[in-house]
Amino acid sequence: MAAVTIRDKRILLVGATGVLGRAYSHALGEAGARLVLADLAASGVEDLARTLACSFVTLDLSDEGAVVRGVEEAQTHLGTFDGVVANAAITGEALTRMGAAFAPFEEYPLDLWKKTLDVNLTGTFLLAREAGKRMKMTGGGSFVTVSSIYGLQAPDHRIYEGEKFRSFPAYSASKAGVVGLTRWLATWWAQDNLRVNCLVPGGVFNGQNESFVRAYSNRIPLGRMAQPEDMTGMLVYLLSDASRYCTGGVYTVDGGLGAW
């Protein structure tokens, strides 16, 4: 039986510095992967890479040229990729700096819709194209996309009542698109020993206020929001040879939300 291990696997993690990205970075580093971290230049990715004694590249997934250059640079560090993780996504906080990120749907700005799709969905496409063709040429591997529970089911908008933030439409649409792209790529690359699977996190605690945490947790069979570390075991599994017969899969880690 194949072991759930990624020791010495050459892995590129894109979106390394967010709340989930940092958990993934530490978990992959502690598991012995040969790691390259990637994120925006101002994200602190260089400091994180220094902490984990690994390499890093800077890239912006909404910039095609930057993705091409970033993947090329990552390949120079690793030689090739045994695994790639497409974890980067634009946040509501980033969109707020650009405009009315949490506006009602009937008034939602088109530029924020487009920016979300550019990063979350088109960025995943670009990363898959650039990293995937290299993996295909060197014997395959594991490409892991990251969606969201809101890419599979609608949010309960009632839990956002009275909050300064809410679910926004392009996030759900883009993350649903990631699931569709994952399945398409899985069948496209199956003959090349290149597996493509999707990790779907549920709601993760990230400093939300007590009233929101209570409202969200009341919707979860396990009775709580996720901690970032709750996602790392599934990621390691999907990158390991223990998942060698898994492709096109959508793996929810949501505390049972989808079972209601």
Image: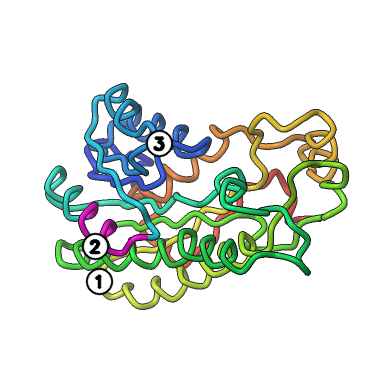
Residue 217 appears in the rendering:
yes
Q: Which residue is mark 1?
A: 192
The alpha-carbon separation of the residues under discs 1 and 3 comes to 34 Å
Q: Which residue is mark 2?
A: 140
Q: Which residue is mark 3?
A: 43
Q: Relative to 165, say whether 225 is above or below.
A: above
Q: Look at 56% across and 65% down and name the residue there.
A: 111
Q: Nearer the viewer, residue 228 or 15?
A: 15
User: In the rendering, at what x and y percent does residue 213 appear?
Assistant: 78, 34
Q: Relative to 146, say whether 43 is above or below.
A: above
Instruction: Determine which of the numbered discs, if any, sits on residue 258 in the image.
Output: none
Q: Give the foreground label among 1 and 3.
A: 3
Residue most extreme to the top: 51
Disc 3 residue type? Ser
Residue 1 appears in the rendering:
no
Q: Nearer the viewer, residue 127 or 162?
A: 162
The alpha-carbon separation of the residues under discs 2 and 3 comes to 30 Å
| CB under 8 Å between discs 2 and 3 | no
User: In the rendering, at what x and y percent does residue 142 appear?
Assistant: 33, 56
- Callout 1 crowding tier (Cα within 10 Å): few <14, some 14–19, many ≥20: some
Q: Earlier in the sequence, mark 1 or mark 2?
A: 2
Q: Describe residue 210's horizontal placement relative to residue 11 as left or right.
A: right
